[in-house]
Image: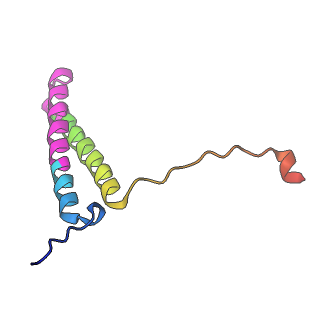
Amino acid sequence: MAEDKQSPPQYDLSAKWDSCLDLSVRRFMYSSLAGAFGGLLLFKTPVTRWASVAFGAGVGIGTAYTECSYKFDGSPPKLSCTPPTSSQEEKE
């Protein structure tokens, strides 16, 4: 009998691509709808309404891209705050 070998979750690219595609479509649609709703409430001219839809779509795509890059590359590096050294310590 052949054994079903499962790859570890960090190497399962098809699942990562599926989740990223799903996340991208959902965030694009929700952000575009939020931009359209905000444009209807706040702006009078069609040009500014379409600009708010485009801004919402861009925000959705940007956040989806950021989260997908975290999924593929791992978590972002943590920056540590080092206390500044005084000028007297540098002279000694």
Question: Can you tell which quarter of the image residue 27 is in?
Answer: top left
Q: Residue at x 76, y 46 (%)?
A: 85
8 displayed left or right of 85: left
Most foreground residue, 45 or 57: 57
Give the quadrant of the N terminus. bottom left
Most foreground residue, 20 or 61: 20
Question: Residue 70 appears at what percent x and percent y?
Answer: 34, 54
Q: Residue at x 48, y 54 (%)?
A: 77
Residue that lies at the very extreme toward the left in this rendered image: 1
Q: Is residue 48 above or below residue 60?
A: above
Residue that lies at the very extreme toward the right in this rendered image: 92
Q: Is residue 39 above or below residue 54?
A: above
Residue that lies at the very extreme toward the top in this rendered image: 41
What is the basis of the colouring in this image? rainbow
Question: Residue 48 appears at what percent x and percent y?
Answer: 20, 32
Q: Residue at x 19, y 49 (%)?
A: 24
What secondary structure characterizes most of the magenta part? helix
Q: Is residue 92 above or below residue 35?
A: below
Question: Residue 72 appears at what percent x and percent y?
Answer: 31, 60
Q: Tell how many labels.
A: 0
Q: Is residue 8 above or below residue 82?
A: below
Residue that lies at the very extreme toward the bottom in this rendered image: 1
In the rendered image, residue 33 lying in the magenta stretch gets the answer yes
In the rendered image, residue 69 lying in the magenta stretch gets the answer no
Question: Residue 71 appears at what percent x and percent y?
Answer: 31, 55
Question: Can you tell which quarter of the image residue 56 is in?
Answer: top left
Specify the segment rendered in magenta: 23-49
